[in-house]
Amino acid sequence: MLQSIAIVIFIFTALRLLVILTNIFTKQWLSVGYDNGNEKVSVLIPCRNEENNISVLLNNLTRQEYKNLEILVYDDESTDHTASIIHSFALQYPQIRYIKGNPLPEGWSGKIYACHKLAQEATGEYLLFTDADVLFHAGCITSAVSHLKKHNLHLLSLFPQQQMLTRGEKITVPVMNWILVSFLPLILTRLSKRPSLSAANGQFMLFRGESYRKHQFHQAIKRSLVEDIHIFRYMKKLGLQVHTLLGNGFVECRMYHSYSEAIDGFSKNITDFFSGRGFMILFSLATLTGLWLIFFSLPRVLFFVYLGMIIAIQTGFSFASGQNIFDNLRFLLHQRVAFFHMVYKALKIKRKGTYIWKGRAISCD
């Protein structure tokens, strides 16, 4: 019995390595693109208590080479200096506009309602939703618009390159890309119509404006905790062409600043990546103990092959994601433990039925 389980784990690990190699060899990251920049892009930023981030982002956006931008910032009842910072930028730059938030209506999640209100104010041919802690590098918006046009997409989502400064971040934040790059061939987010083959990141969601206005995507999933992947799946069900890529250094973000903050953040959506399939989560957790099971149950040569695959997976997802390979190898075991912690906390949240995020109680129903 144990030997059969060990063989299944060995095969599953080999398949994950194959997925990573597929993502690398098909170059599933944003490449340099060119666009004349004539069409307006509305950059839409929901903010709630973002005084430490919003000025950096707005400075960054005013220096973009893509000139036909309007930048709308929605202040979601912030209690810090977010509003005054946005106002000061709006006085200096005519393309920046402050939008005062309304009280959250019943039945909506906070960020989703903010995005919905932003979209109602936007006038661009393209709508780019992003977060206050994101930074865009040269050519990002131009290349994203070019890729969207090239493949006739209705949505392009990017996973930014993550800044990780503390030990806690280096243990937790890579788990997102470890799951993404080794479980999903990203080319299938575009080529396959199956909603289960979906991934998206709310830090960078570039929509074709016409499609967004027709379908009102945020309103369609207004109670969701993880609007990005739910919108992506919804668009696939509608038969709209979509794609998710790695950011390739065009866009970066520092999502969290500590171990506990990252655990709290990831635990609210980690189960949704697996489409709510509990057996997939349990099986993924079981494979984390595979090293010892394979050591005692299979020939020694297969143990060393398995060990090599684990190292190759860690190296491969780090390379594809633009992350520090040495750090990810050094914290390999720590990251697996963090994955256990995220899933455990996610299950507690599901059982409790509510989740606290940025001072709001959010229903998990």
Image (tube, rainbow, N blue to C red):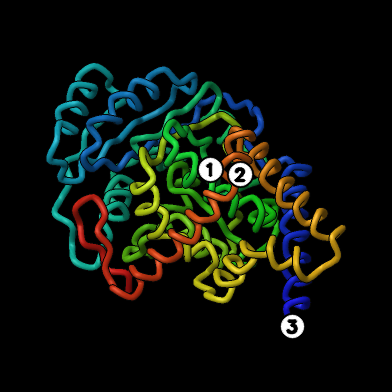
* Circle 3 residue: 1
Give the Cα distance between marks 2 and 3: 40 Å
Q: Amino acid at mark 3?
A: Met
The image shows residue 37 at horizontal and vertical percentages of 52, 26
Residues under numbered marks 2 and 1 in contact, where contact means CB atoms less than 8 Å apart = yes
- The earlier-in-sequence mark between 2 and 1 is 1
Q: Is residue 49 above or below residue 140?
A: below
Res. 88 image quadrant: top left
Q: Is residue 332 above or below residue 274?
A: above
Give the Cα distance between marks 1 and 3: 40 Å
Q: Quadrant of the N terminus?
A: bottom right
User: Which is nearer the eye, 247 or 237?
Assistant: 247
The image shows residue 158 at horizontal and vertical percentages of 54, 42
Q: Note whether residue 149 is visible.
A: no
* Circle 2 residue: 245
Q: Amino acid at mark 1?
A: Phe
Q: Residue at x 55, y 46 (%)?
A: 156
Res. 41 image quadrant: top left
